[in-house]
Image: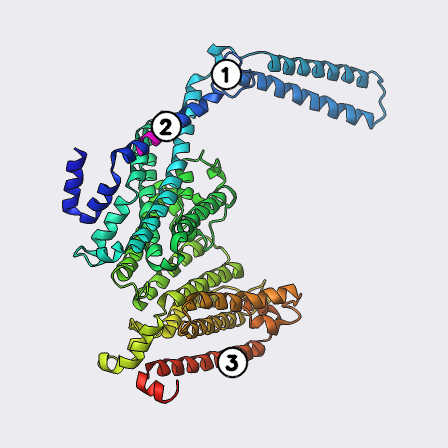
Amino acid sequence: MLLNFIDRVGELNPQLFRELRGRFKPFNLIISMGSSLLLQLIVFIFQFREFPDENYYLRATYCTLREVYQNQEQELYKQQNLLNQKITNYQQIQLSDNTIIPNLDAKLQQVNTELADLQNYLSKNICPLDKIDWELWWRDHWEYTFLTFSVIFIFTLLVGGTYLLISDLAKEEQRGTLNFIRLSPQSETSILTGKIIGVPSLIYLFVLTAIPLHLWAGHSAKIALSYIFSYYAVIAASCLFFYSTALIFGLVSRWFGNFQPWLGSGAVLVFLLMTMTMVSSSRDFNNSLTWIRFFSPWDITNYLFPNLFRSYKDSSISQLQFFYLPIGKNFLTLVSFHLVNYGICSYGIWQAMKRCFRNTDSTILSKKQSYLFIAFTQVMFLGLTIGAVENKSDIGIIILMALLNFALVLILTIVLSPQRQTIQDWARYRHQNHRDKSILQDLVFGEKSPAIVAIAINLLIATIPIIIWILFSPTNFYNGSVDKNKVILAMVLAFTLMLMYATIAQLMLLMKHPKRYVWTVGTIGVAMFLPSIVLAVLGVSPSKHPILWLFSTCPWAAIEYTRTTTILLALLAEITVVALLNFQLNRQVKVLGESATKALLTGR
């Protein structure tokens, strides 16, 4: 029966047939299903360590007499506190009747005796078995089982599946079979779908074997089926997103070798642990980082099952808005938002995978796709931030958005920059291959042209919404002490600085060094962070030396203490540097475009 199923799959998707045939061996199936059943047994039995027996104390959680005795104890504590307070008050005044305090002391002694007797009784006596709330105990037992497997599913599917997919691609690359697959007549969608479904198939089997117990535990814990199936939908969508990300990481990071799967799955594990910590500790959803949290299933899982981290009642996710739409008020809108976010991002990753799968030398994104990507991130950043901010002049939120945007643009600088040979071919043969296109069109949309113009456009897309926000802010910034024009100039300063970094990165990527990508990332990292770190270590305060901070990646720290003319001069200096760097870039591209004979004759 299983062989017939695999044969039918092979007719629909040959790549999936290849993956399933290699993995669905009897031994593998027994290990996958057996380990799942064993884990279910362990989780089910583990909770029985708290099973009420004949030694179950009266103070224990499930003893129905516990509340009665607790009320008595609380009443005695109240009497004790009241008597102590009366004695203290009477000791501070002159009394005409000297028997008042001794009488109160006697009453206090009696209350203390009753309290000690009650506590002694509670510590030594056992709760009768017929006074144990068995229904509540079983409900909590099933809820514990359900929540435990909910966490296990997330880690197993996302971390384990990511590792298997990246490892499989690395092995295919080492054996040379990946190039054979690329040459097959199957479409990219068919091949990549076969990988995503087939490679982690044993993990799917492991999880599916535990689904019946998971469903039964949720039903027995009185959890609504709509919530359970919403959880399944979110997990499926998150698997699609993380697995797609794993595939594209495996395609573009071949130089990591055998460390590749460990790096990818380790990054997913760290991300899950970080976002899990944020769920239980962070209550702030009113910032741009909220979008990053939507890639983790923890927040929505905690929303659906509040006892997972026991923090939902104190969480602000129920107040979450998207462009003033209260998506956190209803579980359906919140789940739908997660699914739409996963869907759009997964679709974008699939477009990138299709580009990279057949042609390994192409950039991950086209320039047009990068514009759409940055525009989408601005919609998400603004939508999740602006609706919940009462004071639109909050400089902290603006700085956070700007930093996230510039980080994205720096990543795009590496992603969009063509290889040295590609730019050389473009510079040499552009006039032959693109006679109907202007140089501007080629720089904006061309696949092989330098990426500096595209980076500038992406920076504009990322900066314009923030500048509009600043312009329409009702007041000035820094408690009214800084004019809005200064803040806009600081944004332009940061824009120019990022354009400078992008040009430096493009120049370094034209080097002949085999590890030019590593050198580029390292150099840009040093250029970005070292000046601010040095200034901070040396104790150079923005209030005393604001000019130095204007040339760092944190010009906002200095604008409060700087005159507008000084900011304009700093901006002019940065524009001059950007112009010189682009002049050098243009010269370098022209040199690359020279024919080999001309380069030889000129001694280059």
Q: How is the image coloured?
A: rainbow
Q: Which of these two is toward me, 336 or 258? A: 258
Q: Amino acid at mark 3?
A: Leu
Mark 1 and mark 2 in contact (Cβ < 8 Å)? no
Q: Earlier in the sequence, mark 1 or mark 3?
A: 1
Q: Which residues are magenta?
A: 32-36
Q: Check residue 480 for magenta coloring.
A: no
Q: Amino acid at mark 2?
A: Leu
x, y percent for residue 169: 31, 52
Tell me if mark 1 has few (under 14), some (14-19) or many (20+) residues whose alpha carbon lies within 10 angstroms of its own.
some
The residue under label 1 is 64
Residue 572 is labelled as: 3
Residue located at (61% from left, 12% from top) = 124
Q: Amino acid at mark 1?
A: Thr
- Secondary structure, mark 2, is helix
Tell me if mark 3 has few (under 14), some (14-19) or many (20+) residues whose alpha carbon lies within 10 angstroms of its own.
some
Where is 494 relative to 581, above or below? above
Residue located at (72% from left, 13% from top) = 110
Q: Nearer the viewer, mark 3 or mark 2?
A: 2
Alpha carbon of mark 2 to alpha carbon of mark 1: how far?
Answer: 34 Å
Residue 38 is labelled as: 2
Find residue 499 and report its image quarter: bottom left
Alpha carbon of mark 3 to alpha carbon of mark 2: how far?
Answer: 69 Å
